[in-house]
Amino acid sequence: MNVSTNVPSSGHAEPLAQRLAELRGPAPQRSLNARSLAALAANPGCHRRAVLDAAGVDKSALAARLGRPAPFGQSPFAIARGVIFESRLKADDYAALLEPLRAHLGVPADGGAPVQVPDLLHRSGPAVRADRTVEALARAAADPDAWTLLDHPMLRLDVAGGTAYLEPDAVVVHGGRCTVVEIKSFPVLDGGADPAKVGAAARQAAVYVLALQQAAAALAGRPLATDPYTEQRLPGSPRSSVLLVCPKDFGNRPTAVAVDVRRELATTRRQLGRMTGIGRLLAELPAGADFDLAADEDGVPARSAEELAASVEAVPAAYGPDCLSTCELGFHCRARARCGDRVEQLGRGVRGELGSIRTVTQALVAATTEAVTTEAVTAEATTDAETGPDEAAERLAYAAALRAEALGRIPVAGRA
């Protein structure tokens, strides 16, 4: 888990950063990473997650304090396996990693042009590391004949008025362009990998590509292209194809798979662009609302579970069943949706189709009324000749008014 080390002090912070620090309390700030940003981009209408992520709140600890911890997360065995695999790739001057890079990117073999690995100040804070990464990227892009490997660079990404710091595994720069390299521990069997894992890795890598696009545009003094499918061939701009380096079959020998992330990149840009600015969301919070998870010397929490729940409910959420697998607060939001009989528990697709209907009870009433109205309209259509056109039209109009009332649109006028 990435933890930001450049939390501003209380006396010199910008107003927005100071307000976010107050919401978080004395707990360490949990920085946004590509995985959390990909999940956030999948649900841009959730103000609750946007505020908590911007403030760096530990959502797992918050969910546990609320009594509904999320029974999911990355397996510690998978994390350990990934760390071991990456360390093997980068041992002996990146000997194992350079093998798939030669096959897919054309990195020169031994005896050719050496691959430069600049020092990116890994022991410094995110802001310092991000500045150093931009400098290294600019130098590497200025020499089209050189090969440069940026090992764990730090990238900035603007998200809803805030700044997220992201750390890809590696970026290769050559010919004035760069390629994102992601190291994953899931295997490639017979030339193929798990589509779900590849898709998740592609969404994560698309966030890195977007951050590099912003960095290249800033270096060139130009705005980012409005069309997400347009590649700006600027110095240091990333290619839309990323490289996934994974174990081959069941061994530790690496292989690489090129993945085009243009679709994921377009989705990420569109979704992040729809997010409401953090400053506006903070202005709508009631006075005294915070997510302080700290405890005093006796272990007594600074905020009770009821106080934390009130602060959480003060921020609107956009719950959907898929939140259960992507957000630590998914089970809490589901319980609140069930207690409130809200239609969100049925899924975003159903929620959108129901329009102004807000509860499951209203939806059931509307469905029942719809069925009765359909039968009535069918019966009226078969007796038009007997009742006359005026009376049939009146009955059809009344049936339409009943349906409109069930859908919560207009009141029904009394029928004579």
Image (cartoon, grey):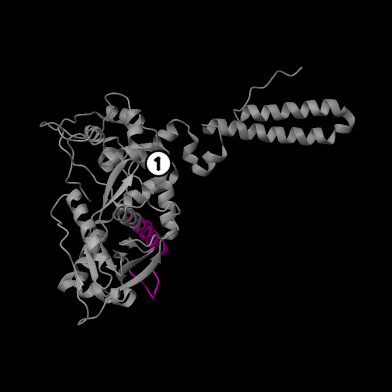
The residue segment tinted magenta is 187-208
Name above or below for residue 290 compared with residue 207.
Answer: above
Q: Residue furthest front?
A: 221
What amino acid type is highlighted by mark number 1?
Met
- Could you say where residue 338 lies in the image, as x and y percent from the top left? 44, 34
- Could you say where residue 306 lies in the image, as x and y percent from the top left? 29, 27
The foreground one among 71 and 293 is 293
Name above or below for residue 141 compared with residue 349.
Answer: below
Q: Main secondary structure of the magenta part?
A: helix
Residue 222 seen in this snapshot: yes
Location of residue 173 (image quadrant): bottom left
The foreground one among 6 and 50 is 6
Question: Which residue shows up at 78% across the image and 27% down it?
Answer: 395
Location of residue 247 (image quadrant): bottom left
Q: Which residue is mark 1?
A: 275
SS at circle 1: loop
Question: Which residue shows up at 67% across the image and 22% down it?
Answer: 412
